[in-house]
Image (cartoon, rainbow, N blue to C red):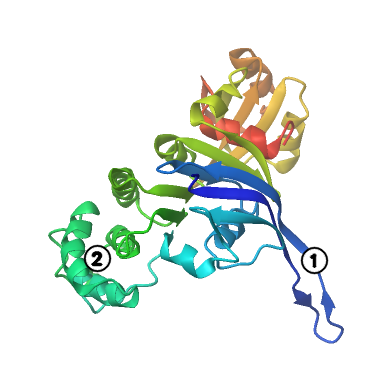
Amino acid sequence: MKAIEVDHLQRIFRPTIGVFRRTTKEVLAVEDVSFEVGAGELFGLLGPNGAGKTTTVKMLTTLLLPTRGGARIMGLDVVKNATEVQKRIGFIFGGERGLYWRLSGIDNLRYFGSLYHVDPDVSKKRIPYLLELVGLKDRGNERVEGYSRGMKQRLHVARTLLHDPQVLFLDEPTIGLDPVGAREFRAVIKNLQSENKTILLTTHYMFEADALCQRIAVIDHGNLVALDTPEALKRFVSDLSVVEVEVYGIPDELVQKIKAQPYVDSVHIENREQKQLLQVQSLRGAEAVPDLVTLLNGLRVGRVIVREPTLEDAYVRLVGGKKA
């Protein structure tokens, strides 16, 4: 049995807009998404903002009804068997909400254990185990208000595991965490594999998906545009090299001019404090550097390197397309 089965899932929102003359507008958030996740698999769902990732997760966790199509969790329909599905899943989102800061970590877990109707004897045994699993064994008696953001997020994991769900949904769980907290949280996610949990992870961090996920689905404009292993997705851009150029204040019209060059596959700009990192995917690799530097003539240019493509480069090619 597959842990997650998604079959032509669609979701249309119909918000009402206007003050005096109110009209209804259709917004197609998810158009047609289908995939399967095996039991015990750590599966990544990637996509730009507004692509439909969170809407898809909300439908799979029974928080939203599909407009069309369907989905099953452990063989149970997310609409017809919503109550039974909820008993078998856990949902962790990025942020610090959902905990009682004036209670200790242990008291938080005891409280949520009672909400989940976990047997008190089971809860008593499971809480110490979960605190150790998430790296909070020695901090359980402290008030949550004294926890770092990363510690609070790890306590979220322990809370979600109280009723021993079979499937976990992690919706951008490391967003807002500092590098140390994010690294510790990724270690916790890896530890969850020891519990043989099925995990669906959404994230904007490509290196995170590359390090954690066994397979990755890329969604864009409500449709699945790729589904494969991280290694296979990287082979999708094996024909390209990436030229990275540090620039200080590059105008939009120049970016468009670079995109129009016949040797350029795609262009991405990453803002970094007072400078930008210009990333150009090109079939010509290092041979493209002189032409790019000529185009940038008159701008202050810093470091220039040529590197092999990564999962992030494959992602940019998939969701941006040629000349994106």
Task: Determine which quarter of the picture holds residue 14.
Answer: bottom right
- Give the residue displayed 63% in from the left and 36% down from the top: 226
Task: Determine which quarter of the picture holds residue 232.
Answer: top right
**Percent x, y for residue 222?**
69, 51
Q: Which mark is residue 26?
A: 1
Callout 2: helix, strand or loop? loop
- Give the residue displayed 34% in from the left and 47% down from the top: 189
According to the picture, the residue beneath numbered tag 2 turns out to be 147
Position of residue 46 relative to residue 65, above or below, is above
Callout 1: helix, strand or loop? loop
Q: How many marks?
A: 2
Toward the viewer: 155 or 77?
Answer: 77
In three-dimensional space, the C-alpha distance between marks 1 and 2, rounded to whole angstroms, equals 43 Å
Q: Can residue 203 be seen from the camera position used here?
A: no
Toward the viewer: 260 or 182?
Answer: 182
Q: Cβ–Cβ below 8 Å for labels 1 and 2? A: no
Among all residues in the image, which is located at the extreme bottom?
20
The residue type indicated by label 1 comes to Glu
- Give the residue displayed 78% in from the left and 77% down from the top: 17
The residue type indicated by label 2 comes to Tyr
**Percent x, y for residue 43?**
48, 42
Among all residues in the image, which is located at the extreme top?
287
Graded by Cα atoms within 10 Å as few (under 14), some (14 to 19) or many (20 or more), the crowding at tag 2 reads some
- Give the residue displayed 33% in from the left and 63% down from the top: 156
